[in-house]
Image (spheres, coloured by chain):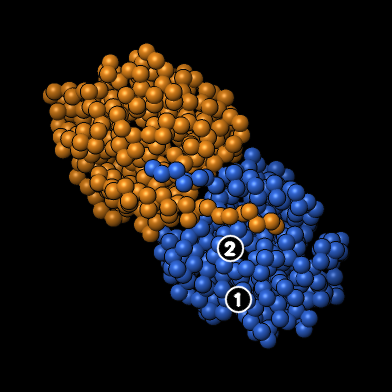
Chain colours: A blue, B orange
Amino acid sequence: MKLITVGSVAFDAIETPFGKTDKIVGGAGSYIALTASYFAQNTGLVSVIGDDFDQDFLGHITGRGVNLEGLETKEGEKSFFWSGKYHNDMNSRDTLVTELNVLGDFQPKVPESYHGADFLMLGNLSPDVQMQVIDQLPNRPKLVVLDTMNFWMDIAWDDLMKVLTKIDVLTINDEEARQLSKEYSLVKAAQKIMEMGPKYLIIKKGEHGALLFNKENQVFFAPALPLEEVFDPTGAGDTFAGGFIGYLASTNDISFENMKRAIIVGSAMASFCVEKFGTERLMNLSQEEIQTRIEEFVGLTQFDMSLAL
Amino acid sequence: MKLITVGSVAFDAIETPFGKTDKIVGGAGSYIALTASYFAQNTGLVSVIGDDFDQDFLGHITGRGVNLEGLETKEGEKSFFWSGKYHNDMNSRDTLVTELNVLGDFQPKVPESYHGADFLMLGNLSPDVQMQVIDQLPNRPKLVVLDTMNFWMDIAWDDLMKVLTKIDVLTINDEEARQLSKEYSLVKAAQKIMEMGPKYLIIKKGEHGALLFNKENQVFFAPALPLEEVFDPTGAGDTFAGGFIGYLASTNDISFENMKRAIIVGSAMASFCVEKFGTERLMNLSQEEIQTRIEEFVGLTQFDMSLAL
């Protein structure tokens, strides 16, 4: 197996200034596995759902090559459900409902067929659950990427500190980087956070792009694509992570130069995500659409400074 | 003459979380003329000061090749004075004092020796004063760049609309772009603003970088350099403008590709500006420091996507 994705597979109900949805497919694991499937072959998902989950979505990602042996279905129980409403500026949202359901006592089980994976993507879950996955793998993957959020910094600090010593790349947003490091400057925050364990840090700034840092003081920045409308930002961060890890896994190259490309791929995929509700825009992208979008990032950011001053 | 800069030459008193200054040199014209002097030869400044102004600063920029024939000194009067205090996040500030003094009835006079300039940079001033400068030039410059702010949108809308039809490039910040266009999306805002006259729009987003738009739907983005500390943001936008217009004037090339380079040069110069109070960091930069800083932007933003997906 090339890549294991761990993360929630869930239902969301979303309200934005553009409209609202009933229960639709959501969850970090759904976004990551779906997005990574455009790049990496031979991937598997570890998660848990109730018997109410959307079988069409599961059939779709299976058809795209995602192995679901690690996806546990709990009969008679319900899938994780989140509902939220975005404010007019789309930069902040209120959580209306969180029903943990099957996620409340989730004990991840990594199937034997997933052992030996080169890449591990730990989507946002409790640090304890993330650690259980790492502990179940007999061989350490070549690259472990972990996403987390402020909630775990508030209630599971010690567990988070432990799992941070076991990973290679941490992805968080700018406010979370400040909370984790107690530094306002993102450059100082990055230095402190990499002392906690990760060799690489990705700071996601939403519409303001993403920064990649390594311990050798290299920094790379990718903007978000300027869009006429952001329709629904839900899942953009997970889609970014799915594009990032999927590209790295498909190229099997974890150099800093290739991580730059992976950041651009993640940014391009996230720019699709926000164009429609939930996973809708990500279900049937063509390679040509993806290539064209990546070329938009090239036009947006690349210049030729070889002319002398 | 290659480049005319118009803008306030003034005193500022600044307080940031890192300290406070007495009266120091400030004003859009000071920052722009000083910064442009690192690139363009044969430049001139149009502004007005009182007899209290700092002669050392004037000597310094004269020594750097800035012609001051267009700088009027009003005997017995005082220079424009602004005082402000930045909040802890450095993204917002309170104005403590604004004393217009000589700027209150400023009637710009463009010396005959400035006529025939190829480039005109109109720093933030009342749209009426900016228009007077354009009207005094017998030959329209090859490129006219105008900076303005929300204050003029509030009190001089009609004059602003008039002068926007006479210029090529408008520079404003993101909030001002939204105010001017009545659109939240910056992409939609840019389209509307370019219908008002400018062929190019630069939207400055402070620590989140800058966007360049043209009427052919091309977009370019440059980030701000991630810094450990922003010591004093005063003048960063004007320094950016000075680097932008200075580079364009020195290369005499107003293609979109060269504007991309000019945006990077402006961003590099602005990254110096914020490292110390006022103009201090900009007074004696070496070509090597500037070149090294531009190379940091290359490392920060450039990637090689030529690998096939």
- At 21% across and 33% down in the image, what residue appears? B62
Compared to residue B231, the image places residue B27 above or below, namely: above
Q: Nearer the viewer, residue A254 or B93?
A: A254
The local secondary structure at tag 2 comes to: helix
Q: How many numbered circles does the render carry? A: 2
> In the image shown, does A128 or B97 lie closer to the viewer?
A128
Q: Amino acid at mark 1?
A: Pro
Q: What is the quadrant of the C terminus of chain A in the image? A: top left
**Category of crowding for the residue at label 2, using alpha-carbon neighbours closer than 10 angstroms: few (below 14), some (14–19), many (at least 20):** many
- Local SS, label 1: helix
Return the residue found at the far left. Answer: B76
Q: How many other residues sit within 10 Å of disc 1, few (<14), some (14-19) or many (≥20)?
A: many
Which residue is labeled 2 in the image? A259
Q: Report the residue at 52% width, 45% height from top.
A: A303
- What's the CA distance linking mark 2 and mark 1? 24 Å
Badge 2: chain ID: A
Question: Would you name the residue on which mark 1 appears?
Answer: A127
Measured from the top left, where is residue B202 in percent x and y? 49, 36
Q: Is residue B137 visible?
A: yes
Q: Measured along the vertical axis of the image, is residue A158 above or below residue B254?
A: below
Relative to the observer, which residue lies in front, B172 or B39?
B39
Residue at (46%, 41%) from the top-left corner?
A: B261
Placement of A303 over or under B64, stated as above or below: below
Tag nearer the camera, 2 or 1: 2
Quarter of the picture containing the N terminus of chain A is bottom right
Image coordinates of residue A161 in percent, x first then y, are 52, 77
Which residue is at a point 67% across and 62% down the rendered structure image? A247
